[in-house]
Every structure is written in structure tokens, then in C-alpha cells.
Amino acid sequence: MTSGQEPSSFFLKRGDLVYDPEKMCLKKAGKEISLTAYELKLLVAMMKAPGRVFTKLQLYQVISRDFCQADEDTIMVHISRIRSKIEEDPSKPKYIKTVRGLGYRFDDEDV
């Protein structure tokens, strides 16, 4: 492309979180948030379907094809780390809510 603006990419925006798929980066209120590849994959999958409940198995399938019972802990750790990076108060999450007995959902209703 010649000098001027680059073509605009599709940004995924939920509340004050913005994902840029071309740069594969997440920003919160304009500040870049450092996420691992797995954390980013999980968060983007959830951001694309706000309100949808994802089971731990479904979330694990976002990052891997194989699953075993012990992998549930892996998902819990990833979700905890994501919350610590994007939530104001990870103990009272605004974005990633736990659905007891089922899994997690990305909630942008309160945002």
C-alpha cells in the first residue's frame, strides 16, 4: 500500500478490552496487556461469544485437541491468570464469570 493509512482491521471490543487480530494484542483502556498464547486464545474465544457458557473441556479444546481429567486444573490456572491481568478485582470478576458446575462465560453486560 502507498503512504497513508493502512487498511483498518477488525477489532473485537468488549467493554474497555480491545483485541487487534492483526497485531494479536489485547489492550485494556488503551494499555497493552501481556498475555501468553494460550491465555490470548482462551480470552478471544470467550470474547467472540459473550454470554455463552464454555465448559472446561470446550476451553481446553481451544488450546489443544487432547484432553484428560487433570487438564481441568490447567484451565482453572489459565482463567485465574487471565483474570489477574484484565480484572480490576480478580476476586470479583467483571468479565470472566464462573458458572458453578458448568464452566465459564465472558460477561459484558455490566461493562
Image (cartoon, rainbow, N blue to C red):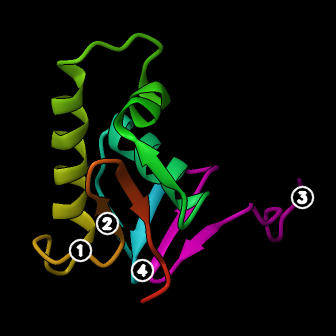
Residue designated by label 2: 97
Residue designated by label 3: 2
Magenta segment, which residues?
1-24
* Displayed quadrant of residue 94: bottom left
Number of the front mark, 1 or 3: 1
Give the alpha-carbon distance from disc 3 to disc 2, as whole Å. 45 Å
Q: With respect to residue 86, does 58 lie above or below?
A: above
Is residue 14 inside the magenta stretch? Answer: yes
Q: Is residue 64 visible in the rendered structure shown here?
A: yes
Q: Is residue 24 visible in the rendered structure shown here?
A: no
Give the x, y percent position of residue 67. 35, 14
Which residue is located at x 49 percent, y 85 percent? 109
Q: Residue furthest bottom?
A: 110
53 left or right of 49?
A: left
Amino acid carrying mark 2 in the image: Lys
85 left or right of 13?
A: left
Front one among 96 and 52: 52
Amino acid carrying mark 3 in the image: Thr
Q: With respect to residue 68, does 9 lie above or below?
A: below
Give the alpha-carbon distance from disc 4 to disc 2, as whole Å. 23 Å
Q: With respect to residue 104, does 6 lie above or below?
A: below
Give the x, y percent position of residue 59. 42, 37
Q: Residue furthest left?
A: 91
Front one among 68 and 41: 68
Front one among 31 and 63: 63
Q: Do the residues labelled 4 and 2 touch (CB within 8 Å)?
A: no
Q: Do the residues labelled 2 and 1 touch (CB within 8 Å)?
A: yes
Number of the front mark, 4 or 3: 4
Amino acid carrying mark 1 in the image: Pro
Q: Which mark is residue 30?
A: 4
